[in-house]
Image: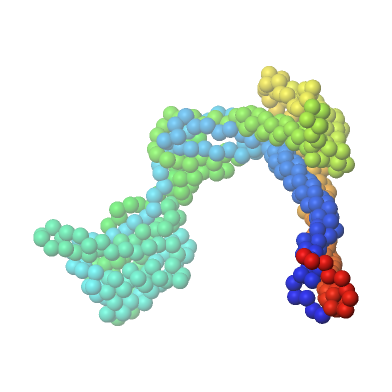
Amino acid sequence: MSISSPGIGSGIDVSSLVNGLLAAEGTAKVNRFDLNEATFQAEISAFGSLKGALSAFQTAIQNLQELTDFQQRSATTSDASIFTVKADETADVSQYGIEVVQLAKAHKLITQDGHFSSSTDTIGSGTLKFTQDSSSFSLTISVTDTLEDVRDAINNATDNTGLKAAILNIDDGVGGTESKLVFTADNTGVGNAITITVDEDGNGLFNDAADLDGSGLSRLINANLDTPSAALDGQIKIDGQLVSSSNNVFTGAIKGVTVTSVATGAGESLSISLDKSSVKTKINTFINNYNTLVDTFTGLSAYDADTQTAGILLGDATLRSVQSAVRTKISSPVSGLTSSFSTLAEIGITTDSSGKLVLDDDDLDEVLDNNFDDLGQLFSSTNGIANTLDTLIEGYVGSSGIIKSKTDGLTESIDSISEQREVLNRRLLALESRLLAQFTAMDALVSSLRNQSNFLTQQLANLPGVYKPKS
């Protein structure tokens, strides 16, 4: 006998009974899965915070890792509207007098008045040759080519040596307009000056008299062009000594120094000094990031007795390991140095009661004033603080570092919980099916027995002599 609704035959709430049995079987395990997963997620987050603090500290360390980080020079100009200056670590500390004699200019040539009435005028035929320094390129001009065609041929030439052509449409002074062809060198300097020569068709020899007469193509040779801007090299004087450049940037005249002219002017000065403020900023960044790391260590491993709340990584071996290793490197003297000091304390950086670094500005200023180069060795030598700490931290935060391995293991544990959830769900589904089948069978049996009982009761009631009490 099939019962479509469990419990109808027996009067028992089979659905509630099955759900209760399933809950008893699965709830405790699900709660345990949830708790473990939340714990693993919290640990992954905690290791992320630790890695972030370590990485920030590593970045600050790497800014102190090279000796050149401590050899920066500060270059100043007495008037930045006349010239600007930059200096690298090779520059000598000194001062110079600067005069900007002449700014570099690009060569510019333009056709003369009255030569062309419009941009569609033809220009003659033959060969145009453009030369800049030792390079040149040539164009073949046909009798039908216009001023516009020449302009485009120049600008589109694949072997163009470094010049542009343009057309100006201007007043001709008598109520009309005229067109002018303008040639401009791409770069400044005498070496980029433009020389234009022609070989007109039918003249035989290159540059003969007919190629200079101011008609046809010869209107484009230098002698028949105006010069709005002559090619000029930039020139400055350093302590009275003349220095030239094809542009307005001067390098090499003073070792490690680049001077850029802005305007002409005399009586200016250039100063090169040790960049103490840059070094001090890097050291302060190092201290601040270390102290942030200490706060991270404390937060992840602290225990509050009043609230009985523990840091997420309290007792974790990885946290203890990196905390101990970093503190040891910070406090240990650097071996093999020839400088005046080998510990942070000797340059004014000490540790307070909370484990954080504290800087004595006066002590560091004295080191910067008297032992500027020695300071670099403390941090950037092979055994220096920056190099040893960088190697240490990389072992924790690197792509194959300890923290990566740790978080990978936690992620695998979370994945394992997901798999266990799936196994549990399958088992509960199977259990539900089995229980429903069992209770359905019981329900059918009870219903059958009840029907039999009712039938027998009816039969007995109909037997002769059976006493039937009045209702």
Residue 152, relative to residue 32: is it above or below? below
Residue 407, relative to residue 335: is it above or below? below
Q: Quadrant of residue 108?
A: bottom left
Task: Determine the residue positioned at 36% across, 77% down.
Answer: 140
Can residue 138 be seen from the camera position used here?
Answer: yes
Report x, y in % for residue 30.
80, 55
Task: Determine the residue positioned at 21% across, 69% down.
Answer: 118
Task: Determine the residue positioned at 13% across, 58% down.
Answer: 173
Looking at the image, the residue that sits furthest to the left is: 175
Residue 432 or residue 68, whichever sits in front: 432
Report x, y in % for residue 445.
86, 74
Give left or right: position of 304 versus 76: right
Can residue 51 be seen from the camera position used here?
Answer: no
Residue 447, relative to residue 279: is it above or below? below
All told, the count of numbered labels is: 0
Give left or right: position of 256 versus 333: left
In what quadrant of the picture does the C terminus appear?
A: bottom right
Task: Determine the residue positioned at 32% across, 71% down.
Answer: 150
Give left or right: position of 377 versus 126: right
In what quadrant of the picture does the N terminus appear?
A: bottom right
Residue 283 or residue 41, whichever sits in front: 41
Report x, y in % for residue 467.
87, 71
Report x, y in % for residue 18.
81, 63
